[in-house]
Image (cartoon, rainbow, N blue to C red):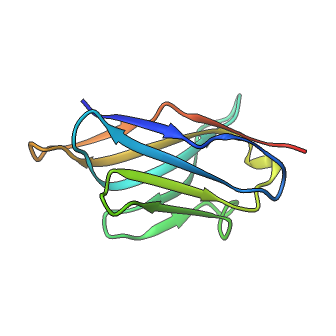
Amino acid sequence: QVQLVESGGGSVQPGGSLRLSCAASGTIFSIIAANWYRQTPGKERELVAAFTSDGTTNYADSVKGRFTISRNNAGNTVYLQMNSLKPEDTAVYFCNARGLVPDGNEYSYWGQGTQVTVSS
């Protein structure tokens, strides 16, 4: 069973930076594609960054130029580098990754979420 464990959230002042991590644990999991979402109370979950199986990255207009999604060389951790943070970036951030387990099957998993608060 694969778990995606998120870390790196916290509180930061406007203009600051955070790097979120989403690490696969439990068994070998080779990430093929991944997304980062965020959600605030009363609102739908919003896709903010994605990378696809062909290596393409996509970003919501609201974070373009400030956020960067990446994957480590081992292929088992996904990152979201967030720069120039704004109060409106405050949310719970979730990762979602699709990948391969040792038996060759493909699965998709969600992380537990990590709180990001941007406030002065």
Measuring 85% from the left and 43% from the top, which residue is drawn there? 119
Q: Position of residue 5 (x, y in %)?
A: 44, 36
Viewport quadrant of the C terminus: top right
Quadrant of residue 116 within the rendered picture:
top right
Q: How many marks?
A: 0
Name of the residue lying farthest toward the right: 120
| Residue 108 in the image: above or below residue 80 | above
Q: Position of residue 75 (x, y in %)?
A: 31, 57
Residue 41 located left or right of residue 110: right
Name the one closer to the observer, 7 or 115: 7
Quadrant of residue 9 within the rendered picture:
top right
Measuring 54% from the left and 40% from the top, which residue is drawn there? 7
Measuring 65% from the left and 67% from the top, which residue is drawn there? 64
Q: Position of residue 94 (x, y in %)?
A: 53, 40
Name the one closer to the observer, 65 or 47: 65
Viewport quadrant of the N terminus: top left
| Residue 23 in the image: above or below residue 82 | above
Name the one closer to the observer, 18 or 109: 18
Measuring 41% from the left and 60% from the top, which residue is drawn there? 71
Quadrant of residue 59 within the rendered picture:
bottom right
Residue 33 located left or right of residue 45: left
Name of the residue lying farthest toward the left: 103
Q: Position of residue 14 (x, y in %)?
A: 84, 53
Residue 105 located left or right of residue 78: left
